[in-house]
Image: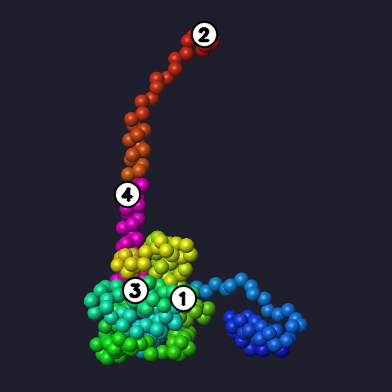
Amino acid sequence: MIDSWGETMSVYSRPHGMATVRSFLKKNGYNHLPSPAWRLGRKSFHEGYQREGLQKILSYLDNDLEKLYCLTAKDSGLRANDLLMIRYRHVRKDLEAGKDYVHIAFEPEHYERRKAAGITFIGPNTLHHLHRLIERGRISKDPDSFIFPYAYNTILQILRLARTKAGLDPRIQPSHGFRKFFTNQLSRVGMDVDLKRRLEGHHLGVEDAYTERDVEVLRPVYAKAYQYLDITEEGAVNSSLSQLQQKILDNQKEIAKLRAIVERLGRIELEPPITLSPDIEN
């Protein structure tokens, strides 16, 4: 009966749901249950969104608040539950100070749980829409007002529909795909791995006590990565230009290294050839 009930659940919920029921029954005297029919295999891998996919998703969203959710998700890398917890007070300080990269300043408890929020930011793509929605009165400046008036399941349904209309891979997780985009773009910068984890909200283990938490130290690190997070056409041009400039610098360093080797070889005095006596030659 447990196995049959488990088949009615999604493959992701099934193991936890069945284990919960089995645990409940055992605690109430059913100690001779057979081994479960399900097995935990390798965790399936899901791709994140790519730049073109994000642009398509946005094109199929008519509501500006829905677009703001997507932009905030890809800029900050926050999980869906954290995104839906953002209140105006969390962005007020940097937003009203006119910062180019606004820190999402959650209360301490958001950073101290098992799946912690990252010490992260939102950039120009998101801020452009955010300022516009505030001016139009769609977002309140009341410190306690939520930025996104959605329930978790509601925003997932909206994103699933947009993903389908855009013709994207249905295996891309509707909201978590933005977080994977964020993580993939940070990897392109080549930043310190512990600072990257700090921005992502991943646990650092013993390195946690030694890794920077100062927002003003992390802000320029994030700003450097934004060339890859920017999904505008201008951002794509800047990213390509940056990569070309880096390639030129790498080539110049290699040329300088080769020149130094050539110069060292030029200073080596070759010993005269050994002349053999006639007797040795014979």
Percent position of residue 25, x then y: 69, 87
**Marks 3 and 1, how far apart at CA:** 19 Å
Q: Where's residue 143, x and y in %? A: 30, 86
Badge 3: residue crowd in 10 Å (few <14, some 14–19, many ≥20)? many
Q: Which mark is residue 70?
A: none
Looking at marks 3 and 1 on the same chain, the residue that comes earlier in the sequence is marked by: 1
Which quadrant: the N terminus? bottom right
**Reading the chain from its start, which is encountered first: label 1 or label 4?**
1
Location of mark 4 (residue):
252
Q: Is residue 191 above or below residue 69?
A: above
The image quarter in which residue 213 lies: bottom left
Q: Which mark is residue 279?
A: 2
The answer to the question of whether label 3 and label 4 lie on touching residues, with beta carbons closer than 8 A, is no
Residue density around tag 2, few if under 14, some if 14–19, many if 20 or more, within 10 Å: few
Q: Which mark is residue 121?
A: 3
Q: Is residue 35 visible?
A: yes
Residue type beneath disc 1 = Arg
* Residue type at numbered disc 3: Phe
